[in-house]
Amino acid sequence: MEQRELEQLAKKQHWTVATEGKGLLWTSPTGEKVQSASGVNGAEVLNLRSRLRRAGLEIPGLKRVAVVGKTDDVQSVSRALDAAIQMIEELADQFAHFRKAQTDATITFRGQLQALEKVTGEHTQAMEMLRDDVENQVAADPIAEFRKRLA
């Protein structure tokens, strides 16, 4: 359905369609107003058609969606919402347990890492001390000293 067809349909249902600036002003018999650009097409026409329908224009071939009208429907929606809330609460509880487990594991891992860093640091210091001792022993080699004196 094009804009021109919507305009004819609206006029048949006692709507007024007036040019306003670069667009159109659609006014229903009950006084509801809808503004649109003139010369709309494609998706813009679908948008205009939806806005006009919501303002009360009866468009052949379009059915109005009934709002929940039965008590049973309200109760089934209520039950569905209750079930959704319960699922969300269960997921939140599971997430809390997961997060606590991850936090505990992280704390344990950090402790192990710090202990490893300490041991590694101690071994590094011991290796440096051993290297220094070996170099001092080489420097203090009595046979090398004796050979130097003979030469």
Image (cartoon, helix red, strand yellow):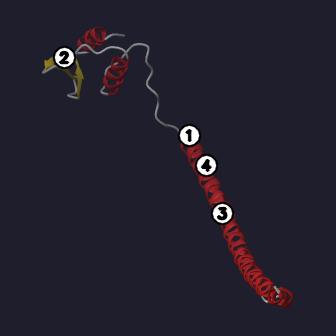
For disc 4, the neighbor class at 10 Å (few under 14, some 14 to 19, many from 20) is few
First along the sequence among labels 2 and 3? 2
The single residue placed furthest to the right in the displayed view is 143
The single residue placed furthest to the front in the displayed view is 151
Which residue position is annotated with label 2? 17
Say what secondary structure mark 4 lies in.
helix
Q: Amino acid at mark 3?
A: Asp
Quarter residue 115 falls in: bottom right
Which residue position is annotated with label 1? 73
Which residue position is annotated with label 4? 79
CA separation, marks 2 and 4? 46 Å
Q: Amino acid at mark 2?
A: Val
First along the sequence among labels 2 and 4? 2
For disc 2, the neighbor class at 10 Å (few under 14, some 14 to 19, many from 20) is some
Q: Is residue 52 above or below residue 151?
A: above
First along the sequence among labels 1 and 2? 2
Say what secondary structure mark 3 lies in.
helix
Q: Nearer the viewer, residue 123 or 128?
A: 128
Question: Total marks drawn?
Answer: 4
Quarter residue 141 falls in: bottom right
Which residue position is annotated with label 3? 93
Say what secondary structure mark 2 lies in.
strand
